[in-house]
Amino acid sequence: MFSTVLIANRGEIALRIARTCREMGIRAVALYSTADRDSAVVRFADRAVHLGPAAARLSYLHIPSIVEAAKLTGAEAVHPGYGFLSEDPDFAEICEANGLTFIGPPPRVMEQLGDKAVARRLMGEAGLPVLPGSAGAVRSPAEARATAARVGYPVILKAVAGGGGRGMAVVRDDADLAGAYQETRAHARAVFGDERLYLERYVDGARHIEVQVLCDSHGNAVHLAERDCSVQRRHQKLIEESPAPNLPDPLRREICAAAVRGALAVGYVGAATFEFVLAPDGRFHLMEVNCRLQVEHPVTEMVTGIDLVREQLTIAAGEPLTLRQDAVRPRGAAVEARVNAEDPDRGFLPTPGLLTEFVPPGGPFVRVDTHAYPGWLIGPDYDSLLAKTVAWAPDREQAIARLDRALGEFRIDGPTVRTTTGYLRRTLADPRFRAGRHTTGLVAEMAAEEAAAH
């Protein structure tokens, strides 16, 4: 096992990784930008290294500085968390070239699955169902139009290098396709540095089901059941839960088995999430594979009792999985809500500012992953996530009630800070969510109903 791990990230995920490192007797090295010099992980870690100014490209995305920090502190491995460089195969290769273990899949596998068009092809060859769409990147509006005519509207344009719900556009008729193509391509170029797009059929009334998979370097793989992440705004998740409600057990087993089959087919090593769209007719199709720890991983940890970061570390150290599929027995239900520093009444605009009060909830079977505290300055440079609040209970109804109670206990204040706690509680109370009959269209449906009421 490693003696020192460098955490190439910030915020709540950096603190969460550092905690498991401490439990395992591993020295944790934190990195920080000037804006994060007073962050919780800097205070907690065994050592902290200043990377550079607030701009991510000069700090958390600046590979030479990260590698130098690893060498300076004697780190043997790098944990990238999620976001930033977590799915960058070049970064993984550079780590290996400098004698550092990258805690994630091999660079070749990451490169293949990071290219969404290539991933579609590979997973199709492995027997996983994929939506009808382009064989690769669509190179022009004319090619996109021809592909859309073949697969049928509505369609969705996606950035080949995309992730995190960005670089997507749903198109419902031919008249809007050319404009959407140009706009999405420009967005992909600006955000991901890769303007390539692919196209596939869009499924209305769908659910978003994902499967957590762990694979070691000895050919072993297990799934840790599924999560339902259908509550989304602009393709970004707000509420996640496990198990997925109203999912027939035979279908649940089929989806989970497909994820394991796909992981083994490409020689995956580490933690992966296979994301599927579940159509109203009960058929499922692969959307993408995420080669990293997910934001919503605590949901799985709460129902399985398995520390996913610990598993990542032991796998990266070359140890075989000690988990066996028949020993993975999820219990009860867990629901997670992302508390963001955003104003739902202004289109979820970020609301940076000074936190004058921050008191997270407590109580039985409630977990709060956060890096915030009174006096913390929420800057404009990074993601607006403040806290992930997760509630576990023996069944879904109790878990929802417990999460609602926890969200109501939050005390967050600041002159300019607004949060999503009230909006999340309204979503939990929605009859469609309560019944487990909601789809990825729930947030838009709620918005339309609220607009009509006013």
Image: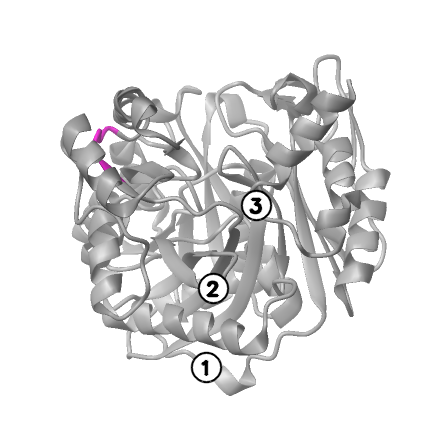
Residue 367 on image: x %, y %:
72, 53
Dots 1, 3 in contact, CB < 8 A? no
The furthest residue to the bottom = 326
Kindly state the secondary structure of the residue where label 3 is placed. Answer: helix
Q: Is residue 361 visible?
A: no
Q: State the residue position of label 1.
A: 322
Residue 354 drawn in magenta: no
Q: Is residue 139 left or right of residue 343?
A: left
Foreground disc of the pair 1, 3? 1
Residue drawn at 15 percent across, 34 percent down: 143
Kindly state the secondary structure of the residue where label 2 is placed. Answer: strand
- Which amino acid, by three-letter code, is at mark 3? Leu
Residue 4 on image: x %, y %:
41, 55
Give how far apart the Cα atoms at labels 1 and 3 are.
26 Å
Give how far apart the Cα atoms at labels 1 and 2 are.
16 Å
Residue 414 on image: x %, y %:
75, 18
Q: Earlier in the sequence, mark 1 or mark 3?
A: 3
- Is residue 94 placed above or below 54 in the rendered structure? below
Task: Find residue 130 and report its image quarter.
Answer: bottom left
- Which amino acid, by three-letter code, is at mark 1? Thr
Question: Magenta segment, which residues?
Answer: 193-198
What predominant SS class does the magenta segment belong to?
A: loop
Quadrant of the drawing holding the N terminus: bottom left
- Which amino acid, by three-letter code, is at mark 2? Gln
Quadrant of the drawing holding the C terminus: top right
Q: Which label sits on residue 212? A: 2
